[in-house]
Amino acid sequence: MSNDLLYKMAVTRIPKVGGVLAKNLISYCGGAAQVFSANKRELLKVPGIGRVIADNILTQQVLHEAEAELEWIEKHDIQALFYLDEAYPQRMRNYTEAPLMLYYKGNADLNAPRIVSIVGTRKPTERGKAVCEDIVEGLKNYDVLIISGLAYGIDVTAHRKCLEADIPTIGILGHGLDQIYPHQHRQIGLEMCHNGGLLTEFSYKIGPNREHFPMRNRIIAGMSDALIVVESAQGGGSIISAELGNKYNKSVFAVPGRRTDEQSKGCNHLIKTNKAHLMENVEDLAYIMEWIEEGTPKPAVQKQLFVDLTPDEQRIVDILKTADEVDIDTITYQAGMYPAQVASLLLNLEFKGLLKNLPGKRYMLV
């Protein structure tokens, strides 16, 4: 691994510097390495950087910590993914809250064509567990990657069924990869690394603190195309994930229950307040998402013919032809244009019916 990665990892360790401030710091300094070569006067010019943070950077202590961690992740075959890396989850990269760095052990594609997250209560009913297993089994026909939080209850039920059905599944952790919490799920977590993986924003030696679990919910929501709440009481992490899913313009689904079921009150409320689609089976999700089962011939799409394009519009179209989906940052970089100019061109092409705007500021030709 390069020295550049060392500096990127070190930035994430600067005390009192979160993801947004870290990105500003890197941008102002011209790169992660330049953050640690800047003098105090230069650092203090960065909005949000005061004397305490500047002093924390100048001591270089975080560089020594990052060196130890870099050695550890190389030894344990763990990928460190910077938010600008191609392998970083593109669906969430453009969100303000997206982590600067992710640590990943596994073999699944974090940018798989279809990603579904399944969340729910830590104390599910037998009905809830059975419904969860049926959903996972049904999703196998749609060639999906399934993510959850490896917690008790619905999370581990979904992961375990994925392994049984040979569906790739990723657990989003609220701690570093030097451990698996809860320890009862260690074996299943290790098995997931052979068909899926484990993903976290936390450095090694960072334990499963209470505040980390709401933080990991934004990754569960941000990485997915669709988020399913199987069972949930009125409050809790699953409802937080659903709220984030709505904030990120994801398709949120909830399995309904009887009005007297405590573990269905959260799902029923999401449906009643139009924050989730009612989902009784996988076909409901496939209909909303316009998915067809794996192996089913795709219907022919009649593209618009003889549309007049300006040279700049044609350049955007040519970039979109290189992949099924392309995020706006990649389009801007490859086109060599200003962001505002690209946004205007994309809007014009959408009006002409040539492209589709997807969640996470991604675009595809139609």
Image: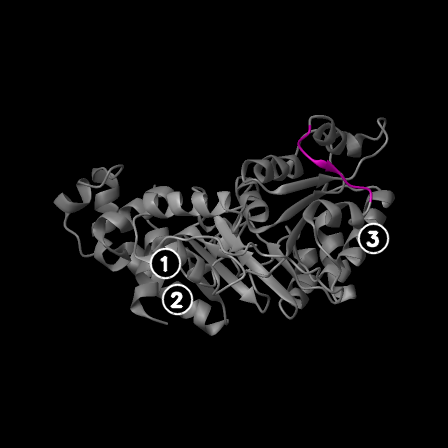
Amino acid tagged 3 = Asp
Residue of label 2: 70
Q: Is residue 279 magenta?
A: yes
Mark before the other along the chain sequence, 3 or 1: 1
Mark before the other along the chain sequence, 3 or 2: 2
Asked whether 2 or 333 is in front, the reply is: 333
Query: Label 2's element?
Result: helix
Residue of label 1: 9
Relative horizontal placement of residue 235, taking residue 220 as reference (left or right): right
Q: Quadrant of residue 315?
A: bottom left
Relative horizontal placement of residue 357, taking residue 231 as reference (left or right): left
Asked whether 57 or 172 is in front, the reply is: 172
Percent x, y of residue 285: 74, 47
Res. 344 visible in picture: yes
Percent x, y of residue 203: 45, 56
Percent x, y of residue 331: 40, 56
Residue of label 3: 134
Circles 2 and 1: CB distance less than 8 Å? Answer: yes
Q: Which residues are magenta?
A: 274-280
Give how far apart the Cα atoms at labels 2 and 1 are.
8 Å
